[in-house]
Image: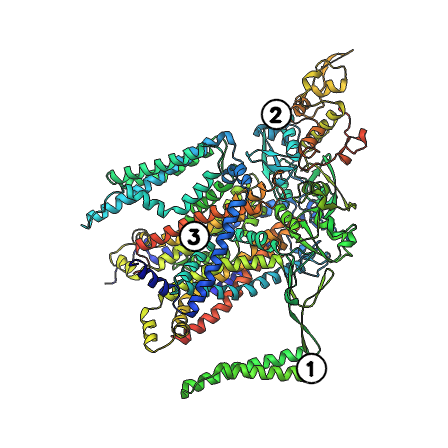
Amino acid sequence: MKLRLIAALAAVFLLAACTQAADTTTTVGGTPTTADGGVTTTADTGGTTAPAGETTTTGATEPGDGLLAEVQARGSVRCGINEAVPGFGFLEADGTRSGFDIDFCRAVAAAIFGDPEAVEFVPLTAQQRFTALQAGEIDVLIRNTTYTASRDGGEGATFLSTTFYDGQGMMVRADSGFTVMEDLANTAICVLSGTTTELNLATRFVDIPYEPLTFDENDVLQEAFVAGQCDGWTSDKSQLAGVRSAFPEGPDALVIMEETFSKEPLGPAVRDGDSQWAQIIDWVVNVTIIAEELGLESGNVDTFADTENLEIRRLLGLEIVSDEGTTIFDAGLGLEPGWPADVITAVGNYGEIFNRNVGPDTPLALERELNALWTEGGLIYAPPFR
Amino acid sequence: MTIAAPRRRWVKKNLFGGVWSSLVTIGLGLAIGYVAFVLIRFLATADFTILRRNLALFMVGSFPRPELWRVAVAVLILAVAAGVAGGLINASARLRAHQAGLPVPAPPGPRSLVNGFRRYWPLALLIAVCLLLTETVTPTILVLGAIGILVASSWALARLPYSRWSWSLVVALPFVAYLVLSSSGLGWDKWGGFMLNIFLTVAGILFAFPIGLSLALGRRSSLPIVRTFSVAYIELFRGVPLITLLLLGVFALRLFLPSQLNPSSVTRILVAITIFEAAYIAEVIRGGLQSLPTGQVEAASSLGLSTWKTTRLIVLPQALRATIPAMVGQFISLFKDTTLVAAVGLSDMLNTSSIATSQPEFNARGLARITLPFVALAFWAGSYTMSREARRLERRLGIGER
Amino acid sequence: MTPARPPFWRNVKVLRAVIQIIALVGVGLVVYVLFFNVTNNLRARGIRTDFEFLDQPFGVRIAGSDLSPGAPVRAALINGVKNTLALTVVGLPLLTILGVLVGVGRLSANWLVSKVATVYVEILRNLPPLLLIVFAFQGVILRLPPARSPATPFGWFVISNLETHVPGFRAGAGYAAFISAVGLALAIGAFVWWWRTRVQQETGAPHHRWAWSLGLVAVVGVIAYLVIGRPVTITLPVLTGRVVDGGFRGLGAFFAVMGALVLYTSSHVAEIVRGSIQAVPKGQTEAASALALSGFQRLRFVVLPQALRVALPPMINQYLNYVKNTSLAIVVGFAEVTLIAFQAIGNGQPAPQVIITLMAAYLMFSLVISLIINVFNRRLRVVTR
């Protein structure tokens, strides 16, 4: 009796799932706008599956009615973050959060409220992050997320100025003698699930036999690598460097291979459809870069009150005297003029953020390299603030 | 010599009763020795800095540190509630003995402190370990204060004249504690660590109970439609693992709600846990209902009681009493299962182990061998204490002896 | 004088119908509201609702399988179900044996044995299974020799923390014929078993069931093996460089999950076994002693068969719990069906449908296990009553 019921239940469950699906497909098919998005699927040889049109747009945006107004009314920014990636986003022993990504969340809060603490951090797993963004659970996603076309297009996300230029690499033990990817044939490779890293690995190793060990949590993966369960660990090179510098046997016991097999530009993402909000996030990032170009630091903002440099005066919201009279520059982003001063005072310029969290003096000990200013041969470049 | 002889006889009988028995004893003895050696070596050589530094993170997650006094006050309030409950149980037992004309046991005296320690030694061990790991003296004062309050209120209530209404205090105080914790915008969405595990367990059972009760009654109902629905619900959710429901809660629950509602991830997971747990509680209650002799219902209907009155006045009071041990069992199993929320990104105590080992100074040093045993101790102490209490209750209520 | 009919609001039949209709409408309303919300939300977010994702490429490779990244999600999920099945098939017998041993051990006359069994039960069943799995993985499996330098005890095994190879066999020519011959022998053996049982019941002659049946199967097996000419060859794992040839292999994560869950579930089984042995009236044991049965015989022929009847329903629950708990393997990266579903969602497949498919898979598992055990249960009841 009970058995038959379970059987019937399973059948009904499956049936319901299918018919319900069929029903809604017809409704979706009826509306031309979503029908299009509903069938967009791409599958390149690399095996990247385009998310089947998870979201097109959510909500209309009229000026003054957008996310900025909502955030201002709420009094805090909801920022989707990671809490277990050393240097980028982690929870300190005292319950506060630190990291490169976290500082950009604080910068956004400082820009809007003048208070870097007006952030509500929402920890997310790799799988959850876009669902949470689409559903409006967070306002901005700053969780070492790689900017890709299918995410920008299919996941209903809009990616903004890249904050960290990274590349995927492979780390092996120095005594393994492995120097190129092909040496890793027939070995096991550790990789985090739900990331672009996982997809890139499949693409790069399409002709090399290997055993992929997929982990859900970074710390278990690290333990597995340290114990030698896998010979190679593939991830963003910044993360590999972080573990390498802290490795118990000393950094020289590990080697990060030369080859970078994918570009991993990491940056903030917002929901599609609210350009004002996107511009704000974009310019918060840009302002930290411009501040570094101009030599503005968290400690010296006050000393620039009498500066002749017009760009600094615009940034700090100081009066600009010209023939037409005295004005204060307002970029029209919907924020108080002079908001960049709050950002810089709160978190510092780009260089400060970098050095504080991942720079040479931190356990991660990363060099600027690609993330140096454009004037110093890097890729960090911002449009002018005027 | 005179003492040694019986002892030797005991050893011979119970440890070396035969060739096989002796071999097994020797083998097990060696194994125990080895385990003890490994354990002592671990305790002596391990560096517990990561726990010392992160103790608060393991307990309350990212709860703002300036607001920690709320946790302290809540602990004290809960200590009062526990003490009152203990005192009332004692008082009501004495009252019942008095009414039945049996010898009335003495109210708790100094000996009951020793008994209490014996009953709750796993918890005491956990608290002692935590206090050893603290860096300031405040937590020790707090714990001593809480124990003092607990003992005092239990002694007082045991001596005051017994009143049924005092139980409302036991029910109300936890809500007061919750209010203290959650006021000024620190609702359960902001909780983490062990506090989150405990909260999810208590809230999950509380919310699931009414649903489970209706499902259990529905399953035994003679109305075919009601019965079918109940059976379908129960078998569906008992047939799938909790993790699938947590996934549903994280990824799909919002789709079932009007778009204005946007519950936080803790709330969504709580909903998933409630849905899951209701099915199990329904089965626990059904067990209690089935244990009731049919004569009870027949007697009630011969007295002319309606079905509803029979259920409310005759069936449920007896059936629910019989389910208490099984309910505690369900509570334990949910308590252990709350660690699963780590897999969907909540910062519970198990996930805190990942978080702590991701801090730059502790990263990639294999420190999970320090943090995991600590988490294990916390869950073990909680579950073991409860399962002992469940067994005590089972004996006291005389279930299984009918 | 017929008694006056009660007014309709006190008529039991009417009342019952009304309550049922209310229940139906209530549930219908809830379902409708949920359905309404779902369709609205799905349309608003443009999420597709069919199950076409099953044919999309999965995109990544899976540990311990030969699937290419281009294989469809369906194949990946089936591979996951196979891995869940493997955990179940290996785990259930192990945990039963371990559970019975510990359960009997708790009632042992040897003080140390009963104490150790008690400690075993009280520690293991009060720990979260998830924690046990993580612990087994990090604390036990990862401490084995690293993958780059495996241990090869006796030349029979190749053991590293990545994977373990044990001796296995390889099918040769005429494998199918050999298997069918052995299968036939097993069928005949079962018939012989039944026949010997009847002989004993009718004539009282000793049945010697084991000797008859096993002897038959062994004889047929050996003859078939010789006639067909080595249809099966035993292979030992051989390590050359990084590649292991021959034998069977299991991933380290598999052993972590299986081992942890076997320990955890066996502690519950031990309690069931102990309880059901204690539920056998003491007179039974005393009567068996009076018949001069040995301690083992008392257990094997008198106590355990009776205890089994009491133990079976809770045992089914434990078996089902084991299967459901295998879903916790995600934390150590063993590619059972839940991990595959996780990966699929992480790589952009629609979450609601993936989860529904996953739930359906587990319902099927629960169903099959209850089915098997219920058949067994029914047989047991008929025989003993």
Q: Amino acid at mark 1?
A: Gly
Disc 3 to disc 1, C-alpha distance: 57 Å
Percent x, y for residue C104? Answer: 42, 65
Q: Secondary structure at mark 1?
A: loop
Residue placed under numbered mark 3 in the picture: B330
| Secondary structure state at the residue bearing disc 2 | helix
Write down the residue under mark 1: C229
Chain containing the residue with disc 1: C
Residue A130, position in %: x, y?
65, 43
Residue C8: x, y in percent?
33, 54
Identify the residue at image location x=37%, y=50%.
B389
In the image, B23: left or right of A228?
left
The quadrant where residue B315 appears: bottom left
The count of marks equals 3
Compared with A157, C229 (above or below) is: below
Which residue is denoted by mark 2 in the rendering? A113
3 and 1 marks in contact (CB < 8 Å): no
Q: Are marks 3 and 2 on the same chain?
A: no
Could you tell me the amino acid type at mark 3? Gln
Q: Which chain contains the residue that carries disc 2? A: A
Q: Position of residue C244 (x, y in %)?
A: 70, 63
Question: Outermost residue toward the bottom?
Answer: C203
Q: How is the image coloured?
A: rainbow
Q: Nearer the viewer, residue A12 or B207?
A: B207
Is residue B272 visible in the rendered image? The answer is no
Above or below A307: residue A20: below
